[in-house]
């Protein structure tokens, strides 16, 4: 953390009071001051707050106390203690947040149904979508490959696997909607699934599932043992 921010707090005169005096302040005063920090955070972004102010917001402590914590853990001779433990926890949390992968994991038909937009589930024509996944079953690309008629979706294997190849997918999930509201697969749906499965085997791209969605529910070929 940048040590210069501690000096900014000290220059304001806020850090001249003792920690005990800060802790004895009414709770309402602390809430009001930290609310001001939150407002500045929302309006100007986290870059507008000093290290001490950020710690004050995260731990709900006075800025003066946060400044003491920052100064303590930044000192070359820091030996630990409760403040150091709190700051260590904050550092670990920040590290984990940086390593968080925002890409959703598609590991069930429920997850698939949750990805499909409501306007597709309720559409009056069949939409055929392809979800491209990496080896960890994370969604890396979603594309509508075909829009059919009121009762049929015209789709070819090359249209389905073309984006999968472009995005170096390890697996794909085929998805299409039933405008009728009944997600039960038709005989044509079963034929398409078999063709996609064979094509995927030839290409080395797994057909992880074929999910039929509607405004009322969904049907998974995988969960029904049809893949």
Image (cartoon, grey):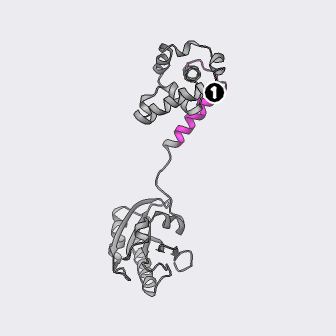
Residue 178: x and y in percent read 43, 78
Query: Is residue 93 found inside the magenta-colored segment of the image?
Result: yes
- Total of numbered circles in the picture? 1
Q: Secondary structure at mark 1?
A: helix
> Is 141 above or below relative to 223?
above
Q: Main secondary structure of the magenta part?
A: helix
Query: Is residue 170 found inside the magenta-colored segment of the image?
Result: no
- Residue 3 in view (yes/no): yes
Res. 32 image quadrant = top right
- The residue singled out by tag 1 in the image is 27
Residue 97: x and y in percent read 51, 42
Front one among 36 and 196: 36
Q: Residue at x 47, y 24 (%)?
A: 2
Q: Residue at x 44, y 31 (%)?
A: 40
Which region is colored magenta? 75-96
Residue 3: x and y in percent read 48, 20
Q: Is residue 38 left or right of residue 145?
A: right
- Residue 55 in view (yes/no): no
Assess disc 1: are there few (<14), some (14-19) or many (≥20) residues with their C-alpha within 10 Å of its C-alpha: few
Residue 193: x and y in percent read 44, 80
């Amino acid at each position: 953390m940048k040590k210069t921010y501690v000096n900014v707090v000290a220059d304001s005169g806020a850090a001249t009071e003792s920690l005990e005096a800060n802790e004895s302040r009414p709770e309402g005063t602390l809430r009001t001051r930290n609310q001001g920090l939150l407002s500045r955070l929302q309006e100007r972004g986290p870059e507008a707050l000093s290290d001490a102010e950020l710690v004050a917001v995260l731990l709900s402590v006075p800025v003066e106390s946060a400044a003491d914590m920052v100064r303590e853990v930044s000192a070359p001779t820091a030996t630990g203690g409760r403040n150091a433990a709190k700051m260590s926890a904050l550092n670990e949390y920040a590290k984990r947040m940086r390593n968080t992968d925002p890409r959703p994991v598609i590991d069930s038909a429920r997850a698939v149904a949750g990805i499909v937009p409501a306007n597709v589930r309720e559409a009056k024509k069949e939409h055929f979508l392809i979800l491209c996944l990496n080896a960890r079953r994370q969604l890396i690309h979603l594309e509508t490959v075909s829009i059919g008629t009121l009762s049929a979706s015209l789709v070819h294997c090359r249209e389905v696997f073309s984006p999968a190849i472009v995005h170096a997918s390890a697996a794909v999930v085929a998805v299409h909607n039933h405008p009728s509201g009944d997600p039960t697969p038709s005989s044509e749906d079963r034929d398409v699934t078999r063709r996609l499965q064979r094509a995927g085997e030839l290409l080395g791209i797994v057909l992880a599932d074929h999910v039929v969605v509607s405004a009322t529910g969904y049907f998974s070929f995988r969960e029904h043992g049809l893949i």
